[in-house]
Image (cartoon, rainbow, N blue to C red):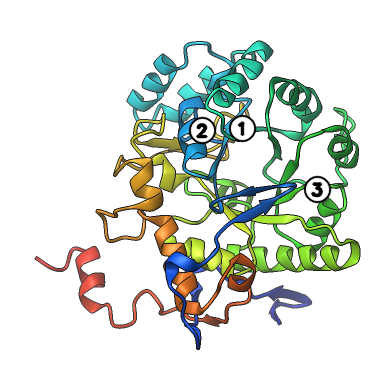
Amino acid sequence: MSVFIGRDRKARRSYGFDEIALVPGDVTINPDEVDIRMPLGDMTLDIPFLVSAMDGVVDPSFAKAMGKLGGLAVLNLEGIYTRYADYKTILEEISKASPEKATQLVQKLYVKPIDEKLIAKRVEEIKKAKVLCAVSAIPQRAERFGKIAEEAGADIFVVQATVTTVRHISKAYQVVDFSKLCKKMKIPVVIGNCVTYKAALELAETGCAGLLIGIGPGSACTSRGVLGIGVPQVTAIADCAAAREFYHKKTGRYVSIIADGGMSTGGDICKAIASGADGVMVGSAFARAKEAPGRGFHWGMATPHANLPRGTRIHVGTTGTLEEILNGPAHLDDGTQNLVGALRTSMGNVGARNIREMQMTEIVIAPAIKTEGKLFQTAQKLGMCK
C-alpha cells in the first residue's frame, strides 16, 4: 500500500528486521531434526551461511575454517590479499590506525595494483583444505578475474557492486554482459546487489545461480547515508523472493536468494529466511571471530573508493571463536553467537522442517517486539540501572 508524502508523490511502506516478528507454529519440531541445507546452483551448503567478501573478515585461512564448518566464506579478489603477498603487516597497520585516519589509510593501501598471480595463489591456498572456494569481483573485472579464478580451481564466482542491474549504461567502459558471463563460466555465478522485483527477475534470467539482496544495510556500509538509496531488508527480500518464485514457475530453474547485510543476531537471520531468503551473507557477526583477519575491526568493500567512500572501518571487537559464533556454546546473551542453533530453534518453534517451509512462516508487523515488557533491559542499555 502506498501513501501520499506530498502533492502527486506516493511512497510505499517498507519494513526492516526490527519491525516484524515470526509467529510460532501450531506444530513444533525438535530443532535437531530440521533441515537447514541451502541449494546454490548444482551444489548444496550444509548450513545457509555465507561470509561477506570483506578484507577484515575473510582471508584464505578464514575461508578454510568456514568451509570445514559447512558454510562458505567469499574472498575479495580486489582487496589486500591480491595486492600484497605479505598481507599480515597491512592488516596490522589498518587495525592500529586512528578512527580519523582509517579511511584515508585504507584508500592509500588499496592504490597498489592488483597482482593477478595472487588471485590464483589465494584460490589454490583455499582449495588445499578440500573445501569449497568462493571469490568475488566487481562487474568491470568479472570476465578477467572470473576466468583466472575458475582455472585456479574456484567453485563459485560472485560478481558484486553497490547496485547491479542487467541494463547498465556507460560510454566510459565496457559493460559486462551477465548472460554471456554466466554461460561462459563453468562454475556457478552469484550476482549482487539488488533490492527490487524487476531487477531480481532480470538478473535471474541471465542464468546466475544466486542473487545477493541488500543495498546499504551492512554495519560497515555507509551507502544509505552517502547516496540516500536502499530498501529495508524485509521488504527487499520478500520482493526479490517473489521474483525467484515467478522465474522458477516459468522456467523450472531455481535461483537462490541470499540476504546480504543488516543481520547482526540470530533473530535477524531467522527473519531474513522467513522473509524469503534461502541463505544469508553476514559480515559483522563473523568479524568478531578470533579467526577473522581484521583483529576486531571491519570495513566495507567500498571504503577504499578513491573519490566517494561508501564504507567505514568499525570496531566490533573479538568475542569468540568461529565455532562458538556458528555452533556455540554461546557465552553472550545478545544473539550474536550460536547462529546455527538460533536458526534451528526458531525453525522448530514455527514448525518448519526445512528452509522452504521456513519461508512460509507467518509474519506480523511488530515495532514493539524488542521493547515490549523489557523495561529493565531497556533501562540497563540506556545506563539507567546501577
Tell me which amino acid carries mark 2.
Ala
Residues at marks 2 and 1 touching, judged by CB atoms closer than 8 Å: yes
Left or right of 123: which side holds 90?
left
Which class describes the residues within 10 Å of circle 1: few (<14), some (14-19), or many (20+)? many
* 240 up-or-down from 119: above or below: below
Q: Position of residue 361 (x, y in %)?
A: 58, 78
Tell me which amino acid carries mark 1.
Cys
Q: CA distance from mark 2 to mark 1?
A: 8 Å
The residue at 87%/53% (across/down) is 205
- Tell which of 71 and 23 is nearer to you: 71
For label 1, the residue is: 133
- Name the N-terminal-most of marks 2 and 1: 2
Residues at marks 2 and 3 touching, judged by CB atoms closer than 8 Å: no
The picture quadrant where one finds residue 364 is bottom right
Disc 2 element:
helix
* 99 up-or-down from 217: above or below: above
Answer yes or no: is residue 122 visible.
yes
- Name the N-terminal-most of marks 1 and 3: 1
- Tell which of 17 and 363 is nearer to you: 363
For label 2, the residue is: 63
Tell me which amino acid carries mark 3.
Thr
Residue 294's disc is none
Left or right of 2: which side holds 179?
right
- Tell which of 71 and 365 is nearer to you: 71
Which class describes the residues within 10 Å of circle 3: few (<14), some (14-19), or many (20+)? some
Q: Nearer the viewer, mark 1 or mark 3?
A: 1
The residue at 20%/67% (across/down) is 380
Answer yes or no: is residue 265 visible.
no
Left or right of 47: which side holds 30?
left
For label 3, the residue is: 165
Disc 3 element:
loop
